[in-house]
Image (tube, helix red, strand yellow):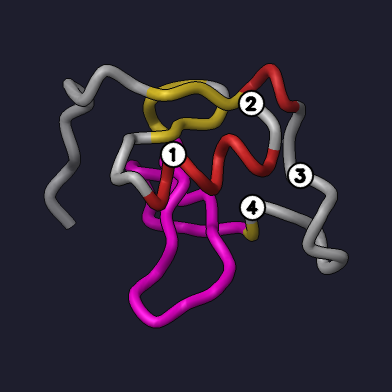
Amino acid sequence: MTLAEILRAVDEGLPVHWQNPGYLVERPVGGDACVIRSLCTGHCIGLTWADGVTLNGKEEEFFVGDGTTLLPVM
């Protein structure tokens, strides 16, 4: 997925994952930039580098999930 496709899917409320269903792309409440959050640890990294364009991952590693990912209790 391209950056534009990822952002559009997130804004539409679709579950976008990176590498596997354990990583979810989210836009924090009140935030402009998206993050990639580990569903196991809660740790986050930016979706992009500081330039706001370069993805922290390869385009082919991002995908829209089917909505069946179970979220851990934190």
Looking at the rendered structure, the kind of residue marked 4 is: Leu
Q: Which mark is residue 1?
A: 2
Check disc 4 and report its element: helix, strand or loop: loop
How busy is the neighbourhood of tag 2: few (under 14 within 10 Å), some, or many (20 plus)? Answer: some
Check disc 2 and report its element: helix, strand or loop: loop
The residue under label 1 is 9
- The residue under the point 56% across, 23% down is 19
Answer yes or no: do the residues labelled 2 and 1 have beta carbons within 8 Å? yes
State the CA–CA distance, disc 2 to disc 1: 10 Å
Looking at the rendered structure, the kind of residue marked 2 is: Met
Residue 42 appears in which quarter of the rendering?
bottom left
- The residue under the point 74% across, 44% down is 56
Looking at the rendered structure, the kind of residue marked 1 is: Ala
How busy is the neighbourhood of tag 1: few (under 14 within 10 Å), some, or many (20 plus)? Answer: some
How busy is the neighbourhood of tag 3: few (under 14 within 10 Å), some, or many (20 plus)? Answer: some
Q: Which residues are magenta?
A: 23-45
Looking at the rendered structure, the kind of residue marked 3 is: Leu
Marked residue nearer the N-terminal end (3 or 2): 2
Q: Position of residue 54 (x, y in %)?
A: 84, 49
The residue under label 4 is 47
Is 22 placed left or right of 54 in the picture? left
